[in-house]
Amino acid sequence: MNDRERSISRIAAPVRTFAQKFVYIGLIVAAAALMLFGKIEPAAFERARAQVTDAIAPILDAVSRPLDYIHDAVGEGKSLLALREENARLRIAQDHLLQWQAIARKLETENKALRDLLNFVPAVGTETVSARVIGDSGGAFARTMILSAGSREGVRKGQAVITGAGLIGRVQEVGLRSSRLLLLADLNSRVPVVIESSRVRGVVAGTNGETLRLVHLPPDVVAAPGDRIVTSGHGGALPPGIPVGIVAAVGEAGIEVEPFVDPARLEVVQVLDYGLDGIIEFKAGRGNKVK
Amino acid sequence: MKPSFWHRVDRFARDLTPFALTLMLLVINAIPFHIPGFAQVAPLLPLIGIYFWAVYRPDLMPAAAVFLIGILHDFLSGLPVGVSALIFLVVLGAALAQRSFFFGKSFIIVWLGFMMVAGGALTLEWFLLSIFVGDLVHARSAIYQFGLTAAVFPFLAWLFTRWQLAFLQVD
């Protein structure tokens, strides 16, 4: 009996390690195959991805709340310490803003008069959905965030995500109660924009770095550091005029744009429902680089 | 004597914990900390789980579990599906190959081994993604990520060692 057991294990052990090696290599091949498949068919895993995110969303939501609270408390403490400086700065800012207000009032009346003159059709009304940032899991090579609103709340793929300061990115995938936000800095992010002063169209592309790149400009267009970049509304998915960033540097490597919003500190964002789905098909996968 | 039914259930539940703990690290990795730039350089925690258990209890960290962790990581982080699965499997393979070398060696050696494997894994990730995108991807944040992952390793390894002593003693 004992002898028999021993002889079985003597045969079984090598068979087992062989089977394990086989499984190991099989899984490596499977992973590579999945990558290849995802490259060919970028939308293939969208549903599965959204479902997994949806399943984990409640956990992330619960965990991120106390963290947000701590973050807020720390921010409160810091701002208390900087109260004096802040006050002086705000006084100066207020003077500036009052000047701007006067200019804006003047332009508003002028604008209204000109619109009346032209029978101008105003833009479609825009609805917004507010969402909390509950996941920030990009890692070194992907820039995405998970939001606490999904199709249940009316979020749809391709919609613009903004804060008061400007555009953050677009909705990449939508689950029932969560959605994934593709940040401007992601390699796959492409947003149609115009240079605000010269009205020249272009596309702002993510580089996975801190700055964005302004590409697809018509030849011999001059952009200078300090130029504001806003969305153009081309493609119909994004409302025109959302601030995107400011030209930081113009060099051999191209035009670098510094975004207005730093996504790292975001807790609550707004998803814009522009009422249009967009005429450009929004691709979710990686590697859809516009050449 | 044959172990009783409840004894076996208990055993099974305990054996599942290395996998469950690594899954937990995966979720922790996705929590937003609102520290500027942190998300890009946050330590790749599941890598630590996989390496540690592959070295100390390879029977509890089979290739299929590693594959599953990798796929879930890809889903959660927005990476192309399969990239992390492939990298985690390579880490598993490397850890299993080094395993016998670590017997009786000090923790520093295990830590150095982890740094080598993690460095290789992140380089491989950068390489795979650059091929995938068809362009050289910025790698600076990956270098910081490597540093932080290596720095966190001793803390998690200590926790896992306590866990192993408390719940996973072979009886």
Image: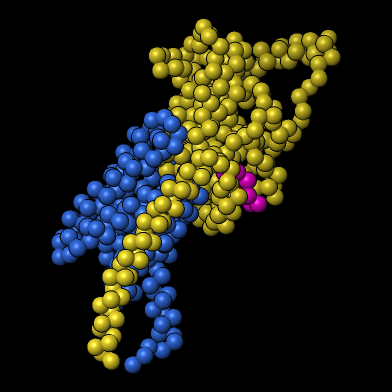
In the drawing, does residue B93 fall left or right of residue A155?
A: left
Q: How is the image coloured?
A: by chain
Q: Is residue A164 above or below residue A68?
A: above
State which chain is coloured blue: B
* Among the 4 quarters of the image, the one containing residue A195: top right
Q: Position of residue A76 (x, y in %)?
A: 49, 42
Label count reads 0
| Placement of the N terminus of chain A among the 4 image quadrants | bottom left
Q: Is residue A267 above or below residue A208?
A: below
In magenta, the rendered stretch is A173-180
Residue A176 is inside the magenta segment? yes
Q: Determine if residue B91 is in view.
A: yes
Please tell me which residue is depicted at 51% across the width and 45% down the height of the picture: A37
Q: Is residue B159 above or below residue A184?
A: below
Q: Position of residue A118 (x, y in %)?
A: 82, 11
* Among the 4 quarters of the image, the one containing residue A93: top right
Please tell me which residue is depicted at 45% across the width and 20% down the height of the picture: A256
State which chain is coloured yellow: A
